Amino acid sequence: MLRRTVASPKSKRHPRKRRNPGAAPRAVASSRRLEREERQAEAARELSRSGRYMGREGERPESPFGGLPISEIGILIGTIGLVIGFFSGGGPVLIVGIVILGLAVLEVTAREHFTGYRSHTTLLAALPAVAVESVIVLLFGVPHQRALLIVFALPVFAVLFWWLRRRFATARQARVTRIARPRAP
């Protein structure tokens, strides 16, 4: 025979209503919850910032020319000279356009790279390697085996790439530390 036990009416427990974890938070947020959310957001920003090596960090570094956009004007003039020289069949306009454009781009990329704002390691390492190749071609002519040009350019590129990457990492660390430091009001 089965016996059922029935609890007395006084001993009935009312179960607590549990909040659905997927439900939206209450309309009035407590200050503790807001503080926790702010801490979590700051931790997420720090985590993403610490793992980021490429890309921009902080404000763009100031130009050495003060408020004048000399490098940007140089890029514009160099591009115009490059296009005009290209469509007119080369000549001095093309060469001057390439030189002006190259110097202006070199200034912007070097400034951004050495201040830790944005990495331009490959471009900055490739420019001297191409210059070495150009000097070899001008002095000795184009070799029969063009792959021989790599023998001289590749070590230059590799050493500069390694050094520039280390230099950027140091500058980036200094920039991130300087940005993360709270400023006094």
Image (tube, rainbow, N blue to C red):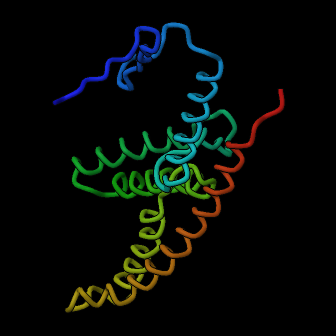
Q: Give the left or right position of residue 175, taking residue 69 as reference.
A: right
Between 125 and 64, the one nearer to me in the picture: 125
Specify the quadrant that holds the C terminus: top right
Q: Give the left or right position of residue 82, taking residue 10 as reference.
A: left
Residue at position x 66%, y 50% from top? 175
Q: Is residue 110 above or below residue 31?
A: below
Q: Is residue 128 above or below residue 147?
A: above
| x and y percentages locating residue 153 in the rendered image | 39, 82
Name, please, the residue furthest toward the front.
1
| x and y percentages locating residue 68 in the rendered image | 63, 34
Q: Is residue 85 above or below residue 20?
A: below
Residue at position x 47%, y 52% from top? 105
Residue at position x 49%, y 46% from top? 48
Residue at position x 55%, y 8% from top? 28
Specify the quadrant that holds the N terminus: top left
Q: Is residue 171 above or below residue 108?
A: below
| x and y percentages locating residue 97 in the rendered image | 39, 51
Name, please, the residue furthest toward the right.
184
Between 59 and 89, the one nearer to me in the picture: 59
| x and y percentages locating residue 59 in the rendered image | 60, 38
Marks counted in the figure total 0
